[in-house]
Structure formats: structure tokens, C-alpha cells
Amino acid sequence: MAALEEEGFHPEVSEEGKQLEGYHGDKRKELAHVIIPRKQVGGSSNDIGFAKDASGKYQAIISEFDRGRHGDKWLNKVKQRYATKMALKLARAKGLKLVREVRANNKITMVFNT
């Protein structure tokens, strides 16, 4: 959620899953647990969704139309933000503090200490 919010979205959460909406407001067959409403995605866009599988992993549901703007490059950026936030959360839970964060060549290096 926080990674998507950093991208400027206000996603909705549905524990049981909710049908995504198409650009005409029609219900699509795909169910998602985290949804970026189409109005936040763009003018003629569909909802963007993330469906949680049995193992707890999320799979992105992005229409072909919306992949032009929210394709692999965008999705990798969101995944990187998510991974960074999870690393910080786990480190703090172990009593570690972030000392330095270096971003170079599309990689993030984080240095922690006690």
C-alpha cells in the first residue's frame, strides 16, 4: 500500500477480492485484493489490481491498454519501493537503524547498524 501511495495512488483493499472495473465502468472477470481505481490511473483506463494467491504473494492485473504507462518499468519501481520498505521494517524489528542508503544503476544498497 505504501509503495503505491508513494506513486500518488490511493488504493482500495478488499480482503475477499473485488471485481475490477473496465474503462466503461463495466465489471471485468478479474478479482483483486488491492485495487487502484481507474479514475486514478488515467482518463480511459481500467482499474489496476493486485490479486493475492494462496501463498500470500501478489500478482499484478494490468490491462494491455494500461501497460503502456504502467508496464514492467513502473511495476519494477513499485516492487523496489515495496522491498525497500519491507527491509526497513524487518531491520527496525531487529533493533537495527538505517545508516546509509545508496541508489545507483537501478539498485538500492542499505547499510544498517545497531
Image: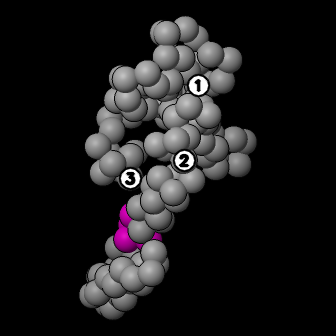
- SS of the residue under disc 1: strand
Q: Which residue is mark 2?
A: 71
**Image point 58% across, 25% down: which residue?**
17
Q: Is residue 49 something one can see in this rendering?
A: no
Q: Secondary structure at mark 3?
A: helix
Decide if residue 31 is in sight here: yes
Q: Residue furthest right?
A: 54
Does the magenta run of residues contain 86? yes
Tell me the residue that label 1 is attached to. Answer: 17
Amino acid on which disc 2 is placed:
Gly
Give the magenta part as a residue range.
85-89
Give the image quarter of residue 86.
Answer: bottom left
| Image-quadrant location for residue 95 | bottom left
Q: Is residue 87 magenta?
A: yes
**Is label 3 in contact with label 1 (beta carbons under 8 Å)?**
no
Three-letter residue code for mark 3: Ala
